[in-house]
Image (cartoon, rainbow, N blue to C red):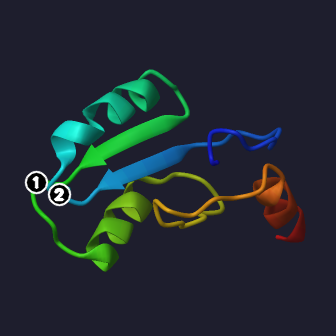
Amino acid sequence: SIAGQDYAGKLRVIVVDDGSANRDLLGPVHKIYASDPRFRIILMAKNVGKRKAQIAAIRSSSGDLVLNVDSDTILAVDVVTKLVSKM
């Protein structure tokens, strides 16, 4: 749902894989988004917990606004546009 946002500004997405046990199954998904210039994938060596994964993403970010969502979050296509307009 992040890839499908209708946001007209510059959108950068940092995906943190926090040591998934099923990383071999996620490989094809990582490859799809690795070729999208908006996406950066961080593969943690081991599971260090949600907070440290969030910190890794925030430290890698460079924008004025940061939106944090879980992997199972599904956003309407206009959510980023609406959030940015409120900020």
- At x 30% / y 67%, what residue is drawn? 53
Whichever of callouts 1 and 2 sits on the residue coming sooner in the sequence is 2
Q: As drawn, is 69 to the left or to the right of 55?
A: right
Identify residue type, mark 2.
Gly
Q: Quadrant of the C terminus?
A: bottom right
Q: Residue 25 versus residue 53: which sits nearer the camera?
A: 25
- Residue hosting label 1: 45
- Does residue 28 appear left or right of residue 12 in this picture? left
Structural crowding at the residue carrying mark 1, measured as other residues with C-alpha within 10 Å and reported as few (<14), some (14–19) or many (≥20): few
- Of tags 1 and 2, which is closer to the observer? 2
| Residue shown at the point (70%, 58%) measured from the top left | 75
Mark 2 secondary-structure assignment: loop
- The residue drawn where x is 43% and y is 63% is 58
Residue ID at (24%, 60%): 18
Give the image quarter of residue 41: top left
Which mark is on residue 13?
A: none
Classify residue 84 as left or right of residue 73: right
Q: Which mark is residue 19?
A: 2
Circle 1 sits in a helix, a strand or a loop, which is it?
A: loop
Horizontal side of 78 relative to 2 (left or right) equals: right
Q: Is residue 61 or residue 74 the one in the foreground?
A: 74
